[in-house]
Amino acid sequence: MGRLADIIFTPEDRQAGAPEAECTQALQKGRAEDERWTLRSDGSRFWASGLMLPLAERERGFVKILRDRTEIHVAQMRLRQNEERFRILATSIPDLVFRSLPDGTRSWGSPQWIDYTGLALEDSVGLGWLDAIHPDDREATLAAWARAPAQGQYYAEHRVCRRKDDAWRWHQTRARPIVAQAGASDSEEWVGVMTDVHDLRQMKDQQEVLLAELQHRTRNLLAVVQSIATQTLRKSETLKAFESEFSGRLRALSRVQALWARRDDREIDLRDLLVTELAAHGDDAGASERVTLEGPSILLPAEPALILGLGLHELATNAVKYGALAQPSGKLFVSWRLTDLNGRAAVALDWAERGVAVKSMPPGGRRKGYGSELIERALPYQLGAKTRLEFAADGVRCWLIVPLDHRRT
């Protein structure tokens, strides 16, 4: 009592002339309203909403009414801070951020959404954002929103149009409620994020294709191994002979698989196949004067390469044991070219051995074994190839025409 009313003003407000300005406004306009920090008697502060009115008898002064609104003010400050944090986060991440009602009706879209889709904010609010969703995905998109309130979250995958190239790219959309008002669930606000998963889906699809291809080729490889084992056993006179021949053929399979695994395009160059097989038998085809390889670069798909690799293994094994690579006078010429076989692209290969003495022929003369059956029967059956194998006086001669796909004719 008896002290100046400006005692409740903070020092900075008193210094700024706030008490005097308030009185002046009340006299001129009949009232002065303000909201500011105000002092208590113990020096602490509270946020007050004030109204100052001049008394009817002006000389008697003013009446001022204050209401403590600290709790509301602090809550509003925190809300503004949270809004600012959300704005910074939503506009800083590459994902497309939005706010909506539980039925999918949007109230806001981030700048990234506008830039990505080309839809302005006023065109995106409500259900306008559906214009950027692929027509085939809109029904499922809205159906997911119909389920969202009961599930407490929204999830969908749909295609979104990218404005810069009009490309439809897959996005994964997730949303959750951020405000739950008791008894007013329809007015809840949801916040969601749309993440571009197009490349991820493509990678997943590629993995599924590769897995299916791996399973297919594994089955085929096991079938080949089983066939090799059966035929080798049938042609072997002793268990020791079987062990030697079977192991060699399995190693040939392994070499083809190793070549296949090293190439990203999963195709094998015919020259690499020949060089690898000859090198495995101790002959450096790249430096040897006894071996001549001539032909263009021709890529073989996996299955033709596998069966052809086995055939080349049999020819190389015979050449090392009894043929052109078994004696100093022998020479091996291998040439190949692209050709056509019944309308299919094919490779024609000519294997010619020269300078082989008759005495170096295998025991039993020119008896045909597993290798002959593989070339003359298995290649035509499995690959639709044409083959001819001759045991000439001075060495083996083999002609192969192998389609570059693996469809049987």
Image: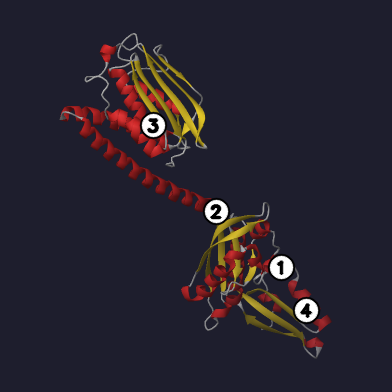
Kind of element beneath mark 3 = helix
Whether label 4 touches label 2, CB < 8 Å:
no
Q: What amino acid type is highlighted by mark number 2?
A: His
Tell me the crowding category of disc 1: few under 14, some 14 to 19, or many 20 or more residues within 10 angstroms, Cα based: few
Of the two numbered discs 4 and 1 in the rendering, the one whose residue sits closer to the viewer:
1
Q: What amino acid type is highlighted by mark number 1?
A: Glu
Q: Quadrant of the N terminus?
A: bottom right
- Give the mark, 4 or 1, whose residue is nearer the N terminus: 4
Residue that carries the numbered disc 2 in the rendered image: 198
Residue that carries the numbered disc 1 in the rendered image: 122
- Give the mark, 1 or 2, whose residue is nearer the N terminus: 1
- Give the mark, 4 or 2, whose residue is nearer the N terminus: 4
Residue furthest to the top in view is 329
Percent across and percent down for residue 409 are 43, 41
Percent across and percent down for residue 213 are 41, 46
Residue that carries the numbered disc 3 in the rendered image: 308
Kind of element beneath mark 4 = helix
- Give the mark, 3 or 4, whose residue is nearer the N terminus: 4
Of the two numbered discs 4 and 2 in the rendering, the one whose residue sits closer to the viewer:
2
Left or right: 241 in relation to 6: left
Percent across and percent down for residue 98 are 60, 65
- Give the mark, 3 or 1, whose residue is nearer the N terminus: 1
> What separation in Å lies between label 3 and label 1 (alpha carbons)?
65 Å
> What separation in Å lies between label 2 and label 3 (alpha carbons)?
39 Å
Q: How is the image coloured?
A: secondary structure
Whether label 4 touches label 1, CB < 8 Å:
no
Of the two numbered discs 3 and 4 in the rendering, the one whose residue sits closer to the viewer:
3
Left or right: 27 in relation to 245: right
Percent across and percent down for residue 402 are 44, 32
Left or right: 131 in relation to 221: right
Residue that carries the numbered disc 4 in the rendered image: 23
